Image (cartoon, helix red, strand yellow):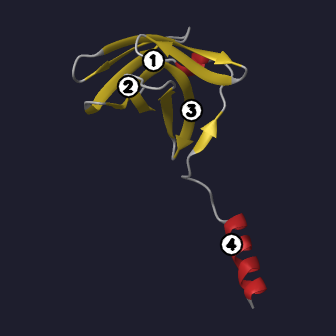
Amino acid sequence: MRMHLALLLAVAFAVSPTDGIAGEKQITDVKELAGTWRGSATSDSGVARATMTVKEDGSYEASTQFGTLTVGKYSLEDGKLRYRSTLSVGTATISEERGRTFLTVIPEGLKPITGKTVYERIK
């Protein structure tokens, strides 16, 4: 009986629709990031709304509701999306969910000034 239940569950998961489930998207050129992104940035002070504009060469400017301005640049290194800014360095990922595109920025290091930031493409 347990074997039948396990098999039934396995089949149910295998054939269930995956629309709406976030999936990481590989990019091949930083030009794919060009546009305006809006999200929430975390820091020791809390969470702040942030807006970022990325140019086709991967350079960007991001600002928060508190007036913090960050300037940086995205690059592809060994197929991984990386960034370097005036506040931190780290990795980034692109994901898509229900027709929306998200950019997640994750700083590296022991004590970055800002924490993980999730942006949504708005144009």
Badge 4 or badge 3: first in the primary sequence? 4
Q: SS of the residue at dot 3?
A: strand
CA gap, disc 4 and disc 3: 28 Å
If the image is split into quadrants, where does the N terminus sit? bottom right
Percent x, y of residue 49: 29, 30
- Give 100 or 42, whichever is nearer the viewer: 42
If the image is split into quadrants, where does the C terminus sit? top left
Badge 3 or badge 1: first in the primary sequence? 1
Answer whether residue 34 is visible to the viewer in this image.
yes
Residue at point 56%, 47% (across, down): 22
**Mark 4 surroundings: few (<14), some (14-19) or many (≥20) residues within 10 A:** few
Q: Are marks 2 and 1 in contact (CB under 8 Å)?
A: yes
Residue at point 62%, 56% (across, down): 18
- Identify the residue position indicated by label 3 in the image: 94
- Identify the residue position indicated by label 1 in the image: 88
Q: Are marks 4 and 3 in contact (CB under 8 Å)?
A: no
In front: label 3 or label 1: 1
Percent x, y of residue 34: 51, 17
Amino acid marked by disc 2: Thr
Answer whether residue 121 is visible to the viewer in this image.
no
Q: Quadrant of residue 80?
A: top right
Picture disc at residue 114: 2
Badge 1 or badge 4: first in the primary sequence? 4
- Identify the residue position indicated by label 4 in the image: 12
Q: Are marks 3 and 1 in contact (CB under 8 Å)?
A: no
Q: SS of the residue at dot 4?
A: helix
Picture disc at residue 37: none
- Give 44 or 84, whichever is nearer the viewer: 44
In the picture as drawn, the residue positioned furthest to the bottom comes out as 1
